Amino acid sequence: MRGRLSSAIFLIIATLAQSGESAIPKLNLGDPRFQQWMPAGPNDTRSACPGLNTLANHGFLPRNGRKVNATTIIQGCFQGMGMSPDTCSIIVLDGLVEASLPMDLVFDLSDVNRPSWKIEHDGSFSRQDVSENGSYPQFDKEVWAATLQALTQCSGSAGFITTQCLGLARAATITEARRRNPKSVYDMKAASHGAVEAARIQLVLGTSTGADISYFSSIFEQERLPVHLGWMPRPLVAGMDEMLDVAVQIQASSPLLQNTSDGTIATRHDLLEVLSVKNLDFEQDVLALVDKAGFSKDFFMPEVSTLMHDAVVPPIVTPTIVAPPIVITPIVITHTIAPPIVAPPVVAPPVVAPPIQVHTSAPPPVQFVQRRPQPQPQQYVWYRGAWIPTIYLNWYRGLYGRWF
C-alpha cells in the first residue's frame, strides 16, 4: 500500500512540475519571525497546546491569539514548524466536527480548550488535569518536572529523546496524574490524542527516531521555537502516515498506555477510529481545507484516501493458532506382589510291611552240586608250515633248536 502511495505522490509531483504549478508553498527558512520570539502578554489569549502558543509567540499565528480559523492554523503550522497540512487539517477538523461547528469558524486559541472540542485531555506532559484546576491551560512546573525527570532518566547523558523515551514518559505522567488526582481520566480519547501529540512534537523537533531533549524543554517551558539551539524546520514533516506509525510505537512502550478505561488503543486503526475520520464527508472536508490554505489537494489526496480506508476497514488480523499443550501421562508401574505359592501337603500312603512268616520247621538242607572243571580251549600257533599247540611250542624249540 505504501509503495503504491509513494509512486502516486511521485507521479503527482512530476505532473505538477511539468505543468508549472506549485504543489506546496515554499518554506522560508529566512523568515524573520523565527528570531522574533515574544511571550504572551496579559491581554493575550492562549490554549493548552504548547505548539499553538509557540506559533503565536513567534507571530506565525496572531500574537494576541484571537480571530484565527482552520486555514490560518494550517498555514502557521507549516510556515513555523514545517508541519504537513494534512495533519493540521485533520486535527483542527476533528475538533470542529466534535463541537458541531462549521469549517470556516473564526475563534480564539482559548476556545480550543472547550470540552466540546474533545481535544484536551488528562495526563498532559505539562498541564494539570481539568478536574484539578480550572486554569489547566497554564504551564505547570510540577507536572512538567515529573515529565522531564522521566525523559532525562531515559535519555541519559546523550540527551536524545527516542520514541521509547516518549512512551515511558507518558506512562510516568499518567501514573503521576493518578497519584495527584484520583479522578484523572485516561480513556480512549485521552490515549489517542496523547499519542498523536507526542508523535507530532517528536517529528517536528527531530525525526522518527527521536529528538534532542533541549528542544522539548524550549517548547514546553518557554513556548519558543528552538532556533537559538540550532533547530530549523523541515518541509512537510509529521505527515499523518508517519505520525500514526510513531504514535503506535509510543503506545507499544507500555501496556499502561494501550489499556484505557473504555477500550484499547494500540493500532493505527484504533487511533483513526477515535478521530472523526469516519464521517462520510471528512475526506472531502480535509482536502478542501488543504486547498484553501494554499496547498494542492491533488498532492495530498492519495495519503488522505489511504487514511480514510485504514479508518473504515479494520486491519486483517491473522488468528494465532495455539496448539494444545502436549500432556505426557506418566506411566505408573505398580509392583504386584504375587501371593505365596502354598504347595498342598503331600500325604504319603502308609507303608504296609509284608507279613513276616515265621517257619516253625527247619528249612530244607542245602544241596551242593559239584561241577567238573571245563576244559580250556586249545590254542595253536602257525610255526614253520604247521599248526603247533602253544603248550608244545617251547618244547619243540628246545628239542630241535633253531632248525625247528
Image: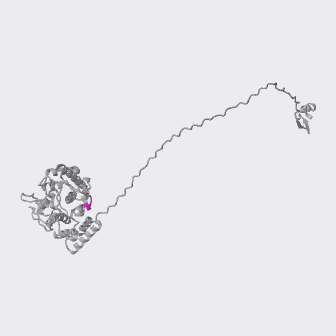
Percent of width and height locating residue 399: 93, 31
Residue 191 magenta? no
Vertical order, 194 against 334 (above or below)? below
Percent of width and height locating residue 146: 18, 50
Residue 268 magenta? yes
Residue at (22%, 71%) from the top-left corner?
Answer: 298
Percent of width and height locating residue 364: 83, 26
Residue at (70%, 31%) from the top-left corner?
Answer: 352
Q: What secondary structure predominates along the stretch shown in magenta?
A: helix
- Which region shows up in magenta? 266-270
Q: Compare residues 401 and 163 and report the one nearer the observer.
A: 163
Vertical order, 187 against 352 (above or below)? below
Image quarter hosting the C terminus: top right
Apparent side of residue 256 relative to residue 348 in the rendered image (left or right): left
Q: Quadrant of residue 263?
A: bottom left
Tell me how many marks there are: 0
Percent of width and height locating residue 314: 28, 63
Residue at (29%, 68%) from the top-left corner?
Answer: 4
Vertical order, 358 against 202 (above or below)? above
